[in-house]
Image (cartoon, coloured by chain):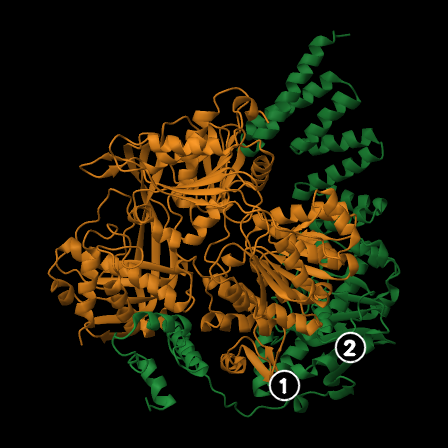
Amino acid sequence: MSASLHDRLRRLRRGVDGADTPPPADGDDLERLERALVGAPGDGLSLKERLERLAAAAARGRGPHRERSRVAPAGVPLEELLEGRRVENERGEFFLMEADASLESFHGDASLSRFHVIDPGTVAVLSGEAALVGFDLREAAFLDTETTGLAGGTGTAAFLVGLGFVDGDRFRVRQYFMRDYPEEPALLRGLAEDLQRFSRIVTFNGRAFDVPLLESRYRLNRERFPLDSALHLDLLHPARRLWKLRLESCRLQSLETALLGLRRHGDVPGEEIPQIWFDYLRRRDGRALVKVLEHNRLDVVSLAALSGLACRWVEDGWAEDPRDVYSLARVLERAELHERSEAQYRRVAEVEDHPLQVRSLLRLAARAKRCGDHAAAVALWERAAGEGDWWALRELAVHHEHRARDLEAALAVVQRALAQLEEDGSPTVHRVAADFRRRHDRLQAKRESRPAR
Amino acid sequence: MSQQLVLRRERTEGGLVSALRALELAKGPGSEPVLTALRRFEAQPAEFAEFPEGLHPRLREVLAARGFSRLYSHQRAAHDAARAGRHTVVVTPPASGKTLCYNLPVLDTILREPDARALYLFPTKALAQDQLAELHSVVEALGADIGTFTYDGDTPADARKAIRARAHVVVTNPDMLHKGILPHHTKWVKLFENLRYVVVDELHSHRGVYGSHVANIFRRLQRLCRFYGSDPQFLCSSATIGNPKELAEALTGKPMAVVDRSGAPRGERYFAIYNPPVVNRQLGIRRSALNCARDVALSFLNKGLQTIVFAPSRLATEVLVTYLKEALETRPGSEGIVRGYRGGYLPLKRREIERGLRDGSVLGVVSTNALELGIDIGGLDAAVLLGYPGSVASTWQQAGRAGRRSSTSVAVLVANSTPLNQFVARHPDYFFDAPVEQGRINPDNLHILVSHVKCAAFELPFGADEAFGSENVQEVLGFLEEDRLVHRAGERWHWTSESYPADAVSLRSVSSDNFVVQDVTRDPRIIAEVDFDSAPSMLHEKAVYILEGKTYFVEKYDHAERRAHVREAEVDYYTDAITYTKVRILERFDEEDVGRARRSHGEVHVTSQVVGFKKIKFHTNENVGSGELQMPENEMHTSAYWLTVPRDVIAGLSFGGEERRDGVVALSYTLGQLAALFLMCDRHDLGVAVGDNGQGEARVEKGLRKSSPGEQPAAPGLDYEPNVFIYDNYPGGIGLSEPLYRLHARLLAESRSLIAACACHDGCPSCVGPAGEAGTRGKEVALALLDAILVR
């Protein structure tokens, strides 16, 4: 049993494991059973040896042994690649980068100069949240984080926080970066100090992701969370409401390409970002990180530019594509700006053969009905029914039967619906047809019980 | 109350004794006695204790209003220990008022310190629901603002935030704690900062691999508590188990005070073992145990005695319900006095049955072991156990469901014809004198430990001098750093992976993906749920699905949608599925000849598949037809250790072909038992199968064929070369096979000693399995086989 650890491990890997084979059975069985019971399955091997076995087994499972080079090639320190500075506070030190540009300068096809003319009431309309009335984008902080993953939970950290804000006629982006985990408390403290002067923040999906994640980091580092009472515009939701009918994706970068005409060159894909930072932790090579920092900075500027665009869209009714016009009408309707909303619906209602034409007619009709303008509602339903919409027929039938109390007109509508549905014949209309048939029978019965005048 | 018009309740000793006498008379003339044992256990008077001096007056008032003028001695002892700051484990019989043992100190504490918090852990959601209802009613009576909520997979997302903020008592299960709470602890600041008590109910169920996981979850929990500055006390309660203190201490890592002297009164109890009479002497065939259990149950039920019948399977449960309903629910107003109870019944239905048992409106219930755990159904007059439940602890637990506080109760174990049951029936002393099984865990199993170190690192960075369990966690972290999962910076280890490690660690092998059973006779409605593993055997097309005595015909089995369509049908038969299990070797990690046999370990693919079914007529149990099925395979990738007995060794034994195979099966039984013992895991953590290299391709392994009774697998061929597989019964494996590979020599040597030293003649549960299960000469062949292998 004098074999060295090295030899024993090698023997284990070859599977010629004799060292821990007990002598053949003899002696007191009970005692041996007892020993077997009390002895750990480690069988006298050290933890390290057992871990090695585990690794070996795992590697076999994976196929060829993974390279585990611990010698890093010489890298370039981040500090040499970027203009930034060390910031010190009570919790230690972190790395801060700053960049700024004129509000007039272009980001894609757009500039931030519009910020000056946006009505402070627009954000409330855009978001549908009354609490956001008076939300001036010039006083807001635009926030975006780069994290060690998307899984959530306390094992996900934000290693980079980008913060954009208007400073006079400039748009400034500050980036709070931790070069390793021990810098996190200082980063969070520094960020909190700067956030003090903002009571409004804008994010993209921050409600579900960035803000709870930061809250968790502040808790873990025993720091006060600075965003507890901040007003928060999460642009993701209004963006979806405005553009999802037309655009396939409402991710920030899809929006910036489609709406701002921005093309990023050599941008790093978001899913690679965590690994780049993990690699940086081990190799201290800042080269790949430069792209991550640029990516984050662009995200912050895009967020600001898209916020401005969305506001102008709402204020000026910029939409052209019927899908966008319809979406805009919905946003305005949600904010109870009915006159403006109806104006947009009417634009879509004029587009012949568009799938949203009927939906717009129905929206307008519903509005007219709610306002008590039944004649207008009937006219709109008639138009929609003319496009073959059974829901409009149903509304008409209800109107004639219950409101106008015109059984003949109601029956005519129902018969028209049944004829139309019969033609259609698809299984989905089965229920609808059954509904009309019931209605038909009821109307017949009513007519018979009430003698014709 | 309706049944009381039909059947007069006769809960007297005379009633039980005459019922038992009727059983004895049922045997045929001249045959051996059917009651092979009848033990009497003395009544125990109650031992009371006064309410503790310092108990909050409001709590005392509420308890008094509910009829508690004082406590049982064990409740007082548990309360005192808890209030003295000790971690405690309470081990008392079923229905002895265990719940109060922890509710009392918890509520008392919260009434005084409204910030205090408690975490209640139950192994199943059903138990959690049950306990929550109980706790709710006390809290309501207290009129205090004490939030008690369940937080589990069923909790709606929009309710979760409110619960995190408002709950004083969070009722959950270890799986949710592992995946949903610990990794999000920053959302639970109030709970962790003020956590005073962790209540662990049904402690005995936390054993084996599952228990080893839970022990690590408790380590993680305690780490987080240290971070938030709390140090909770563990209050555990357990059913009968051989080593409650040891298990509780291993699970929690804390010294435990044990309260095991019950002060609850128990009436006089009888325990009888009933062996069905022989009906065919030539063939040694006994009367069907199921029919006997029906008769035994009826002899009690007909006297108005509240009775629970434990059946070994869902199928047997439903068949018995059908029989008992036929016999008893004959008069108007008597519907519903017999109920079934098993996993798969919808929660509302279960609650209704539990309530019915407590208030007496349900006279008889047939259940799987689902009612073995601590769901409150009160004490009943009689328990009938259809077949030996497989462990001493389960037997006492099930029998304990019969137990009135002041009158006599009886439990009858009806043996079936399997060798294990016959062994118990013929050697009642073996059973009565056997020690209760011990609960064993091995939290430092490297696979399990490493998984949880990952989870813990995700939750909170490890300090450079921090410990985690008894192994050197710093070495484990160094190992994880090589895989780049953690990164050491300064004095701390940080998680550096995008993954959410808790998702990769499954505490149990069962999938939580349930099948729903939809009755399409009229408007489609969901009538039951079936767990994933049982669905193919219960819901295959043409199966008869039985729910509380009603028969349904399965029209459609939709695997993708996890759904089956059934239609009500009056049939006079039920179906029994035929399942095959097959083990295929995927990769050998190590392989070596030791003595004259070969040991290997590696990755295997375990397949089980329902391949057909039999139609069995109600009452007569005639086989009235069968069918073949093409059902999806249930597959599992796992790791295994296996022993190969080379062709020439097996051929050199002077036994017949079938005897040789029986010997291998016998040996596999012993190996499986000892492997579990050596690995300190539960026997169910391991799967055992026998394969044959000689069939077809040399490396394609045929698995042990689990055929239905009466069917015989084909005799082994001339080139028979058996493998005995012992595999991790968890998808992905949990690292039991590699240690087994190293234990190979010891495993074989100990198996030989054990078999040779066993005094039985041709096999018993203590060595190669009960006589007859592996042929008539199984023990002899197994021994010869080992002798041949172990020759050097």
Q: Badge 2: how crowded within 10 Å, few (<14), some, or many (20+)?
A: some
Marks 2/1: CA–CA distance: 24 Å
From the viewer's side, name the closer residue of A61 and B243: B243
- Between disc 2 and disc 1, the foreground one is 1
Label 1 sits on what residue type?
Glu
Chain displayed in orange: B
Q: Which chain is green?
A: A
Chain label for disc 1: B
Identify the chain of the residue marked 2, using the numbered disc in the image.
A
In the rendered image, is residue A396 in sight?
yes
Asked whether the residues under the numbered discs 2 and 1 touch, taking CB atoms below 8 Å apart as contact, a structural biologist would say no
Q: Nearer the viewer, residue B489 or B213?
A: B213
Q: Judge whether B298 appears above or below B44 on screen.
A: above
Task: Please tell me whether residue B277 is drawn above or below residue A226 in the rendered image.
Answer: above
- A118 vs B450, nearest the viewer: B450
Q: Is residue A27 left or right of residue B733?
A: left
Q: Position of residue B74 (x, y in %)?
A: 61, 55
The image quadrant that residue B255 belongs to is: bottom right
Tell me whether marks 2 and 1 sit on the same chain. no
SS class, disc 1: loop
Taking the image as drawn, is residue B697 in sight? no
Q: Amino acid at mark 2?
A: Leu
On the picture, is B222 further left or further right than A168? left
Q: Which residue is mark 2?
A: A191
Q: In which quadrant is the N terminus of chain B drawn?
A: top right
Q: Position of residue B198 (x, y in %)?
A: 64, 62
Q: Which residue is mark 1?
A: B491
In the visual, does A286 lie left or right of B137?
left
